[in-house]
């Protein structure tokens, strides 16, 4: 979702004059809140995971070298 969202954020500024301060001054801080009340926190074997375990697994790099996997990682 975040990757798709970033495709829609554009700046109208010359590349030669790119300035990080321009971004920090013109965009608010983003806070991402993850919520899914229907999600079952289980692994492939059906064992219950804690919220931290689930998030760690979700953020772990995927194995493989396809274009989709490389882009996700």
Image (cartoon, grey):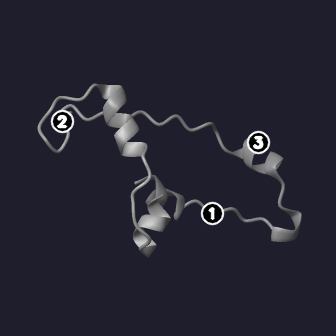
Find numbered disc 1 in the image and state the secondary structure of the residue it sits on: loop
Query: Marks 1 and 3: in contact by CB < 8 Å?
Result: no
Asked if residue 33 is positioned above or below residue 64 in the image, the reply reads: above
Q: Nearer the viewer, residue 61 or 2?
A: 61
Mark 1: few, some, or many residues within 10 Å (few <14, many ≥20)?
few
Label 2 to label 3: alpha-carbon separation? 42 Å
Pick whichever of labels 2 and 3 is earlier in the sequence.
Answer: 3
Question: Residue 45 appears in which quarter of the rendering?
Answer: top left
Label 2, on which residue?
42
Asked if residue 16 is positioned above or below residue 38 in the image, the reply reads: below
Q: Nearer the viewer, residue 46 or 35?
A: 46
Question: Residue 42 appears in which quarter of the rendering?
Answer: top left
Find numbered disc 2 in the image and state the secondary structure of the residue it sits on: loop
Q: Nearer the viewer, residue 49 or 8?
A: 49
x, y percentage for residue 73? Answer: 48, 58
Mark 2: few, some, or many residues within 10 Å (few <14, many ≥20)?
some
Label 1, on which residue?
10
Residue at 42% from the left image edge and 33% from the top image edge: 33
Label 3, on which residue?
25
Mark 3: few, some, or many residues within 10 Å (few <14, many ≥20)?
few
x, y percentage for residue 4? Answer: 44, 61
């Amino acid at each position: 979702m975040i990757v798709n969202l970033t495709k829609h954020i554009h700046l109208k500024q010359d590349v030669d004059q790119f300035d990080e301060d321009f971004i920090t001054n013109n965009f608010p801080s983003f806070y991402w809140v993850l919520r899914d009340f229907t999600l079952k926190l289980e692994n492939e074997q059906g064992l219950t995971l804690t919220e931290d375990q689930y998030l760690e697994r979700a953020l772990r790099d995927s194995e493989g070298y396809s274009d989709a996997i490389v882009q996700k990682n």
